[in-house]
Amino acid sequence: MRAVLDPNVLIAAALSPQGSPARILRAWLDGAFELVISPLLLEELERALSYPKLRQRISADEAHALVALLRGEAELRSDPTGMQPVRSTDPGDDYLIALAAESRAIIVSGDHHLLDLADQLPVKSPVEFLAAIEPP
């Protein structure tokens, strides 16, 4: 199984080591699924991690370590060039939809703009995705 983690899930993992997003990252590192990233996803993540509000809770070293881990271990795909099968009401999410479609991956997000498309796309909340990859 492949997954594209919305940058909001990656940020939540850094903010709360005990939460579902952090458990998803640990499951990925343990080989439970393949994580797909792209340069656009990494740029969005780096930009968000540099916001002063987040920098108060996630140090520059922690942010750098997270991005370096993703660059080194996740499956880096080119930024999508094709059309996504569905458009989000938030155009900033469309690259995630296209990336997931091109790589045949599930989108994992806490963003209602993407979750609202669950009847049209393979998209799950972190809790739903965790339930799908963890044994009962």
Image (cartoon, rainbow, N blue to C red):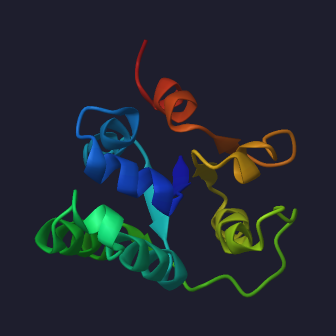
From this viewpoint, which residue is outermost toward the top? Answer: 136
Q: Is residue 80 left or right of residue 7?
A: right
Residue depicted at x 65% and y 67% = 96
Residue 54 picture quarter: bottom left
From this viewpoint, which residue is outermost toward the left? Answer: 61
66 over 114 or under it: above or below: below
Residue 50 picture quarter: bottom left
Residue depicted at x 42% and y 72% = 48
Q: Position of residue 102 (x, y in %)?
A: 70, 70
Q: Position of residue 28 (x, y in %)?
A: 34, 47
Q: Closest to the observer: 69 or 111?
A: 111
Residue depicted at x 74% and y 52% = 113
Residue 23 picture quarter: top left
127 over 16 or under it: above or below: above
67 over 17 or under it: above or below: below
Q: Is residue 4 left or right of residue 60?
A: right
Q: Closest to the observer: 83 or 11?
A: 11
Q: Position of residue 82 (x, y in %)?
A: 79, 83
Residue depicted at x 43% and y 46% = 33
Q: Position of residue 136 (x, y in %)?
A: 43, 12
2 over 97 or under it: above or below: above
